[in-house]
């Protein structure tokens, strides 16, 4: 069994250097470390020459996408297992990869294959008290295997998984067509939901540990806006699932812990921070009703909006991210804006791909970047800036 580690990188710091050194020490050493680096100017090639099996692919900020960039990294990988990490997640010990693989080897309660296994996140030494409690809430000590049946008891947390450190079976990843290719955030949770819908399971593996935490200001918590936008853009997954209940439970449990540990003086900070987080979330769920300037102010990802919803959105009466065959209801709102590729042979899509101006796939996740246009199916087809399909010689069918 082969294992690759895939890491999107932007302005790497000492945590990234420690991450690479810890990967060298793993009991299961990765075959390749695939780096997707945003902006070549920030990459220090001399600093990482001692890392075996590492390859670096550079892209610009404009080309980065949470789903699309990871899909491209997956296309470069030829391994059986892909482990996605972020550049600030440091393995806590040398057993990280070993334990993630054990997580993938488990079975669901009814024999379901585990498609995804994600690690526990531990707070860093400088982590603030409130964030430490948040980590323990989201990443308990007890392992679990989740399937679609957990929705009744766990609600939205059923779909929780984190690409801070998460292992994927490559064969299933290809079958499900990878991550949604254009997303502001939350590509991991969307994929987990898709996997469960297809009959697979997701494993939480607390024995696999990475050190990862942030000390966010109330204003930074407000940028929960982007998370909510990702949920609003995928009503097929999130429409009937509410996050507010989990948020309230987290606040109550954190307040109780603060009082228990004689840290009650931090409760006002908790209230302000949680309020900002909630306000950002509520606005994000209603982003389509907001003016452009307000959206750009609220979002941590302004480039996402430059060529996405605000310019390429079809008739607002039809969710732009759902495209349909001409024979289906609702009909395609704007044939000039969205073109359709019927019968993506061999891709497992079962039907339609939608291509917007600029070649951006609006519906199903695609497999590769193609001439910097975010679309290609498992067939070697690309869309040029005019939306015209053509065969691309560098992406052979079935890769």
Image (tube, grey):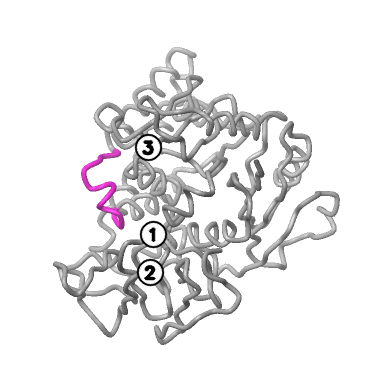
Q: Residues within 10 Å of mark 3 (few under 14, many from 20)?
A: some
The CA distance from mark 2 to mark 3 is: 45 Å
Rendered residue at 38%/81% (across/down): 357
Residue occupied by mark 2: 344
The residue closer to the viewer here, 340 or 118, is: 340
Whether residue 242 is in magenta: the answer is yes
Dots 1, 2 in contact, CB < 8 A: yes
Residue occupied by mark 3: 274
x then y, percent, for residue 159: 37, 39
**From the viewer's perspective, is 96 left or right of 326?**
right
Residue occupied by mark 1: 348
Image position of 128 with respect to 84: above or below: above
Query: Which mark is in front, 2 or 3?
Result: 2
What is the quadrant of the C terminus in the image?
bottom right
The residue closer to the viewer here, 329 or 256, is: 329
Dots 1, 3 in contact, CB < 8 A: no
Local SS, label 3: helix
The residue closer to the viewer here, 232 or 22, is: 22
The CA distance from mark 1 to mark 2 is: 7 Å
Query: Which mark is in front, 1 or 3?
Result: 1
Whether residue 262 is in magenta: the answer is no
Residue lying farthest to the left in this orientation: 329
**From the viewer's perspective, is 77 left or right of 337?**
right
Q: Residues within 10 Å of mark 2 (few under 14, many from 20)?
A: some
Magenta stretch? Answer: 232-243
The CA distance from mark 1 to mark 3 is: 42 Å
Rendered residue at 45%/47% (across/down): 188
Q: Earlier in the sequence, mark 2 or mark 3?
A: 3
């Amino acid at each position: 069994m082969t294992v690759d580690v895939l890491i999107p990188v932007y302005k790497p710091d000492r945590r990234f250097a420690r991450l690479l050194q810890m990967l060298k020490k793993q009991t299961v050493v990765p075959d390749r470390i695939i780096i997707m680096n945003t902006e070549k100017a920030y990459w220090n090639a001399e600093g990482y020459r001692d890392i075996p099996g590492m390859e670096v692919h550079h892209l610009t900020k404009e080309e980065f996408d949470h789903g699309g960039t990871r899909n491209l990294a997956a296309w470069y990988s030829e391994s059986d297992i892909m482990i996605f990490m972020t550049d600030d997640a440091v393995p806590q010990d040398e057993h990280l990869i070993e334990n993630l693989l054990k997580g993938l080897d488990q079975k669901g309660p009814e024999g379901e294959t585990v498609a995804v296994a994600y690690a526990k996140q531990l707070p860093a030494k400088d982590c603030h008290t409130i964030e430490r409690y948040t980590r323990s809430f989201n990443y308990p000590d007890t392992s679990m295997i989740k399937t679609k049946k957990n929705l009744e008891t766990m609600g939205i947390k059923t779909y929780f998984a984190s690409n801070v450190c998460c292992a994927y079976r490559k064969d299933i990843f290809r079958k499900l067509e990878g991550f949604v290719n254009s997303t502001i955030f939350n590509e991991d949770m969307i994929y987990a939901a898709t996997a469960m819908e297809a009959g697979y399971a997701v494993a939480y593996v607390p024995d696999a540990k990475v050190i990862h935490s942030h000390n966010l200001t109330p204003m930074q918590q407000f940028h929960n806006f982007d998370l909510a936008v990702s949920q609003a853009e995928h009503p097929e997954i999130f429409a009937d699932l509410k996050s507010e209940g989990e948020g309230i439970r987290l606040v109550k449990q954190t307040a109780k812990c603060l009082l228990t540990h004689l840290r009650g003086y931090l409760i006002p900070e908790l209230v302000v921070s949680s309020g900002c987080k909630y306000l950002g979330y509520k606005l994000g769920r209603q982003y389509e009703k907001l003016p452009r300037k307000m959206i750009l102010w609220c979002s941590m990802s302004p480039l996402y909006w430059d060529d996405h919803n605000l310019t390429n959105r079809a008739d607002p009466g039809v969710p732009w991210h759902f495209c349909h065959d001409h024979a289906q209801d609702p009909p395609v709102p704007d044939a000039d804006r969205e073109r359709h590729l019927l019968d993506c042979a061999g891709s497992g899509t079962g039907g339609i791909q939608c291509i917007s101006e600029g070649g951006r796939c609006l519906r199903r996740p695609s497999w590769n970047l193609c001439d910097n246009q975010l679309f290609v199916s498992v067939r070697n087809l690309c869309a040029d800036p005019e939306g015209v399909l053509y065969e691309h010689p560098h992406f052979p069918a079935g890769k």
